Image (tube, rainbow, N blue to C red):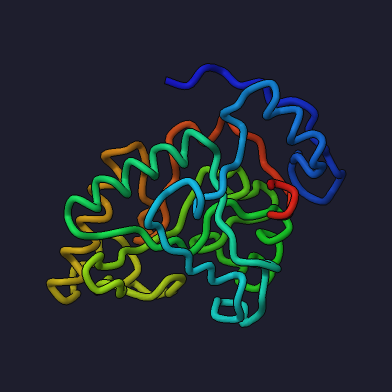
Amino acid sequence: MFRPILLCVLTTLPQTGPARVSEAAQYRQQVRQDARQELVDLAQFIPGLRLDIRYATPHNLTGQRIYPEAAAFLRRPVAEDLRRVQQTLARQGYALKIYDAYRPYAATVRLYEALPDQTYAAPPTRGSKHNRGCSVDLGLIDLKTGRDVALPTDFDAMTPAAHSDYQQLPAAALRHRAILHQAMQQHGFRNYPAEWWHFDHQGWEQYPLLDLPFSALR
């Protein structure tokens, strides 16, 4: 169980969105007060994990680079549970591929401007659970081949086939989706039904929104 977390020293910019932490010093102060606030680098924290950070490339729904570098961070308790997911999947011959994790608030604004549809993009008025370091977008790779396995759609596909209850799919895609979802749910993650790849961690509401670049987290 999570202990209550003091959400301290937030910045509020009138008429430009919700309260959020936008200074590295504020973030570091929170981490000193509660180590669970730390955003950890998944590439270093979870052995065998692979990154495919689409927003660090033009290969995403905007057609532009949103992030200056390919990196993935999550709050420490979230990362610890994701490491357990990786261990569970490894016993079945799979590993995780990460498409996105912590997302600075400024990136959420850009994505919503490109796709102003709340089914697929969080509105800047409330921010995203990605901004809290508590959401992750991911798929699976085969440990033997190192290749992606069959899944319902590509990441960020805005089609009915991306919905988690969509059934008109090849048997392999249905099987792999079920394996991924079962492992994630076993370790404290809840799927967003419109996107088979998107999962939110329990307790997300206890963490503040952040608007810090990846470079400020190292």
Residue occupying the point 69% across, 54% down: 214
Residue 187 sits in which quadrant? top left
Find the residue positioned furthest to the right.
14
Residue occupying the point 80% across, 28% down: 9
Residue occupying the point 60% across, 41% down: 39
Tell me residue 68's x, y (percent).
70, 68
Quadrant containing the N terminus in the rendered view = top left
Tell me residue 66's x, y (percent).
67, 70
Residue occupying the point 19% across, 75% down: 169
Tell me residue 30's x, y (percent).
71, 28
| Looking at the image, residue 177 lies above or below residue 38 | below
Tell me residue 67's x, y (percent).
67, 67
| Looking at the image, residue 32 lies above or below residue 57 | above
For this rendering, which residue is in front, 119 or 197? 197
For this rendering, which residue is in front, 113 or 129? 129
Residue 124 sits in which quadrant? bottom right
Find the residue positioned furthest to the left.
171
| Looking at the image, residue 5 lies above or below residue 92 | above
Residue 209 sits in which quadrant? top right
Q: Is residue 86 left or right of residue 107?
A: left
